[in-house]
Amino acid sequence: MAKRKSVCLKCGQFKGEALTACPACGFSPKADRDVACSLLLTEPFDLGELVVGRSLDELKEASHLIQSGKEFQYNESEVTQLSQMYTAYRAVPTKQIVIDLIRWLGPAIVGIAVALWLWIR
């Protein structure tokens, strides 16, 4: 059984991952605000220098509020910050990601290949 660590924004049920569809109601966060709110309703994790998420007790409270039809109050500055970060993340082209990956991993791969070649000789 998957570890339950996020709360669905729509139905309040616990689910495995913040950005996956809820198995109970089928809601899947797509809009930037929904993604940001989903990330806030998950167990804490590091996002660069920022720690995002809520404690298990806070998640249980949020789950109870949403399931009872009440609105969970998000910190709007956190929502805005995460929404902007997600928008910036989506704006990075795949080509740039590949170039950066090669730039960072290329020298290590070449070094390992040379060391193996010298060792085998």
Image: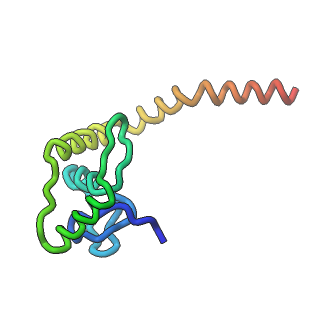
What percent of the width, then of the height, locates residue 46? 38, 42
Q: From this viewpoint, which residue is outermost toward the front?
A: 57
Residue 92 vertical position relative to residue 67 in the rendered view, above or below: above
Residue 23 vertical position relative to residue 72 in the rendered view, above or below: below
What percent of the width, then of the height, locates residue 99? 47, 30
The residue at 19%/46% (across/down) is 79
Q: Nearer the viewer, residue 82 or 93?
A: 82
Q: Nearer the viewer, residue 24 or 78?
A: 78
The residue at 22%/71% (across/down) is 11
Image quadrant in which the C terminus is located = top right
In the image: residue 64, left or right of residue 109: left
In the image: residue 96, left or right of residue 62: right
The residue at 20%/73% (across/down) is 67
Residue 86 vertical position relative to residue 5 in the rendered view, above or below: above
Q: Which of the 4 quarters of the picture holds residue 58?
A: bottom left
Residue 22 vertical position relative to residue 77 in the rendered view, above or below: below
What percent of the width, then of the height, locates residue 25? 27, 74
